[in-house]
Amino acid sequence: WDETHFGKMGSYYINRTFFFDVHPPLGKMLIGLAGYLSGYDGTFPFQKPGDRYEQHNYIGMRGVRLCRLFCAFLGSCLVPFAYLTVLELSKSLPAALLTAFILIFDTGCITLSQYILLDPILMFFLMGAVLSMVKYNNCADRPFSVSWWFWLSLTGVNLAGAMGVKFVGLFVVLLVGLNTIYDLWDLLGNLSLSLVMFGKHLLARVLCLIVLPLALYTAMFAVHFAVLNRSGPGDGFFSSAFQSQLIGNNLHNVSIPE
């Protein structure tokens, strides 16, 4: 059922047709990009669940053949993400392998990953954020090293990705935020650490976990509005001045007084 919505929205991006949706744009933009790169022309109507695809090239959007397919590839990444996260936390190979096998044979995860849905994309960024957070926590003994900066920055990128797909990504933002508060509180209590050095730690986290995600999240909407420049079903949700910028709209290029 959801595939009829998100598949259609992927087509809107390919055709540059403006639409309105309750979710942020990243997931649908990635679905549209996957379809575009695989040769899908954005003409399938997605009118109701169960419609046959016939001659339409949907293979890049619907994950049914190994890792070549977008949603299936992101869904398959959850297994190594979970394995590495548990391995970092527990240092136990059996525990990490058990976690990976549990996900490999999880029918819910397999099912979600084979359709045109936001769920595998969201879970990819959620688990990516958790893995990155655990990795940079384990680099605490060598702060400001290349690996420390890399994992801290990647955490911020994944936070932006999770929020950019669905607002439920706020939960992983909360998790990383609580972890960061605990980390900074621990550093503040370290009497061997100068206030200047503590300030550097605070600034690094503000830059990578607040400024970077916000910049990327804003950039997603900039791309969204730049791509969708043709009149579509979402016009009515916006002002007349906005509609005048959409190609094909009745108000396109009409002079509107302030």
Image (cartoon, rainbow, N blue to C red):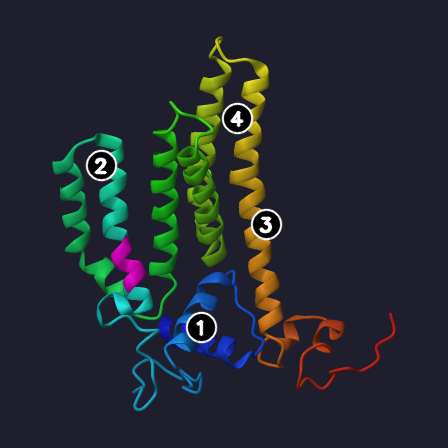
Labelled disc at residue 73: none
Q: Is residue 217 above or below residue 82?
A: below
- Quick one: SS at disc 1? helix
Mark 4 residue type = His
Question: First in sequence: mark 2 or mark 4?
Answer: 2
Report the quarter where the C terminus lies.
bottom right
Q: How far apart are marks 4 and 1 (CA)?
A: 39 Å
**What residue would you read off at disc 4?**
201
Position of 133 with respect to 69 (left or right) is right
Q: Is residue 117 above or below residue 158?
A: below
Residue extending farthest top: 191
Name the foreground residue: 18 vs 35: 35
Within the image, what quadrant is residue 227 found in? Answer: bottom right
Within the image, what quadrant is residue 53 found in? Answer: bottom left
Mark 3 residue type = Ala
- Quick one: SS at disc 3? helix
Question: First in sequence: mark 4 or mark 1?
Answer: 1
**What residue would you read off at disc 3?**
215
Q: Distance between the residues labelled 3 and 1?
A: 22 Å
- Decide: few, some or many residues near mark 2? Use Cα within 10 Å; few <14, some 14-19, many ≥20: some
Q: Distance between the residues labelled 2 and 4?
A: 26 Å
Q: What stretch is highlighted in magenta?
A: 73-77
- Decide: few, some or many residues near mark 3? Use Cα within 10 Å; few <14, some 14-19, many ≥20: few
